[in-house]
Amino acid sequence: MTMQKRKLGTQGLEVSAIGLGCMGMSQSYGPADEAESLATLDRAIELGCDFFDTAQGYGPFKNEELLGRAFKGRRDRVIVATKFGFRLKGGPRGLGDITSRPQDIKDSVEDSLKRLQSDHIDLLYQHRVDPNTPMEDVAGAVADLVSEGKVRFFGLSEAGIANIRRAHAVHPVSALQSEYSLWERNLEPEIIPALRELGIGLVPFCPLGRGFLAGGVKRAEEYPEGDFRRHDPRYEGENFDANMRAAGIVRAIADEAQGMPGQVALAWLLQKGDDIAPIPGTKRRGFLEENLAAIEMHLDDIQMRRLDEALTPDKIAGPRYAPWIMATVDR
């Protein structure tokens, strides 16, 4: 397997075509297993994956610390993306208040650099748009960090078109991170065309539809307390049944292609444009190897059209988030 490279934005950021979302190594999807997580990070590098996604809020803080330990002595071999944007004290469900005041951004970056054991962050995202801080001030603060050499590239997460344009006018945005998959197509009508107009790359998180597109998911009540899926609307009741039926097309095409359903979902994304670099999350080597092998799968035009037509938004049951999380998305 030879991992391809992709360019995000026009400022020089180049990453492996498939990255690794690291959040689940520290939270949301069952108990942490540091030994297996470190082994998974090692294996990713061996296989040519160099794009790793974390955030100060994952853990909180623990995920950045994990990557700091994992990449010590080989920081030059990896592209690390992290995020600022929460004051991690109180707030809804312990998430913390949203804040992107310039001084908060700069303080957050200093703390992230210490946890990552690094002198720079390759890609710094605003985790969520702060409605109380003008986007021009946010972009200006990141521009200062770029000029100081502490940050290489600027990104946004779950931002809407107006704020993408406002940020990009102050300092070039290299990538937007947002949920995008066969399962969640909300970016297609307006966001993706705007990104391409501006020359901004797309980094889809949850590219496997929170597990539905890869198979092996259970009903919400079968997951333990503390697991994100226990309260995911798409895992609940009749929504679960409808969504399992909808994902059947992915399983069918996987059989035709002699691959795995998750590989079909990733291949679909990769073929949607060479400015797209998905970051499927896992904390296990076996799933990592399966995901990265999607680089070798090719779907023909008929298979792509069948997937497009079978998994339109009206076929998916339930909202993508609970209301309190959806309220943080700038749409």
Image (cartoon, helix red, strand yellow):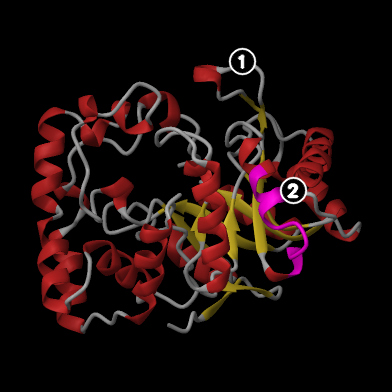
Left or right relative to 27: residue 69: right
Residue 324: x percent and y percent?
43, 24
Residue 274: x percent and y percent?
46, 78
Task: From the viewer's side, name the closer residue of 187 and 31.
Answer: 31
Instruction: Give the residues in magenta.
Output: 66-76
Secondary structure of residue under mark 2 = helix
Left or right relative to 41: residue 317: left
> Which secondary structure class fits the magenta region best?
helix
Q: Which residue is mark 1?
A: 90
- Label 2 Cα crowd, 10 Å radius (few <14 / some 14-19 / many 20+): many
Please state which amino acid type lies under the numbered disc 2.
Leu
Left or right relative to 303: residue 286: right
> Residue 292 shows which numbered tag?
none
User: As drawn, which residue projects farthest toward the right?
Assistant: 148
Compare marks 1 and 2 and give the one earlier in the sequence.
Answer: 1
Q: Which residue is mark 2?
A: 116
Query: Residue at position x 57%, y 62% from top?
Result: 42
Query: Residue at position x 74%, y 65% from top?
Result: 74
Q: Does residue 272 appear in this view?
A: no
